[in-house]
Amino acid sequence: MGWNLLFWLVICFPANIALLASTFYQVLILSDLESDYINPFDAASRINYFVLPEYVGQGALCALCLFTGHWFMFLLTVPVTCYHLRLYVKREHLIDVTEVFRVLNAEKKYRIAKLALYLTVLIVTIFRLTLTAVYYLGIEDDEDIGNLW
């Protein structure tokens, strides 16, 4: 099995699923807060628990794409990584309990945009994983696909 297939299957796919799930959970918590199903302290603590691991995972995925020469994936993930870095340096990455209702709509829109980006990255990852698997398995004709069953 080639290193490229291992990269897409073992590293990129699980990392993208984890980022997508984390962001979906954060959107869900913000929606619950907006509907008044959860109090602001619980919402902020639950979201802030996932912020730093998400930033580290996104940065690591972006750096891996840069170092392995996957330029399209790198260019797709670098804007979010730079934005995460900017928020972290300015210390605006955590949600404040006292101001959570003031920034609720902005945070929700930001996380929905990240959710769309992570879904796009996941689709590209699945496409590249499929192409790499087909290349390494040597499937070129429809007759070869029939032999797999």
Image: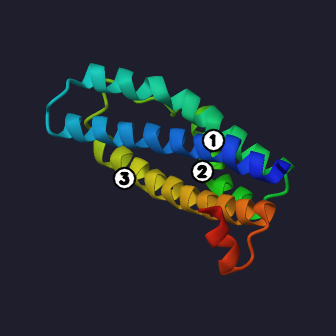
- Residue wearing tag 3: 109
Check disc 1 and give the amino acid type.
Answer: Gln
Tell me if residue 31 comes above or below residue 125 in the rendering: above
Q: Is residue 50 left or right of residue 82?
A: left
Quadrant containing the C terminus in the rendered view? bottom right
Question: Which type of secondary structure does the marked residue at label 1 adopt?
Answer: helix
Mark nearer the viewer, 2 or 1: 1
Residue found 53% across the figure and 61% down from its top:
120
Q: Is residue 37 left or right of residue 76?
A: left
The image quarter in which residue 130 lies: bottom right
Horizontal and vertical percent position of residue 54: 55, 35
Which mark, by number, is residue 58?
A: 1
Check disc 3 and give the amino acid type.
Answer: Lys
Q: How is the image coloured?
A: rainbow
The image quarter in which residue 15 lies: top right
Residue found 14% across the figure and 33% down from its top:
36
- Residue wearing tag 2: 80
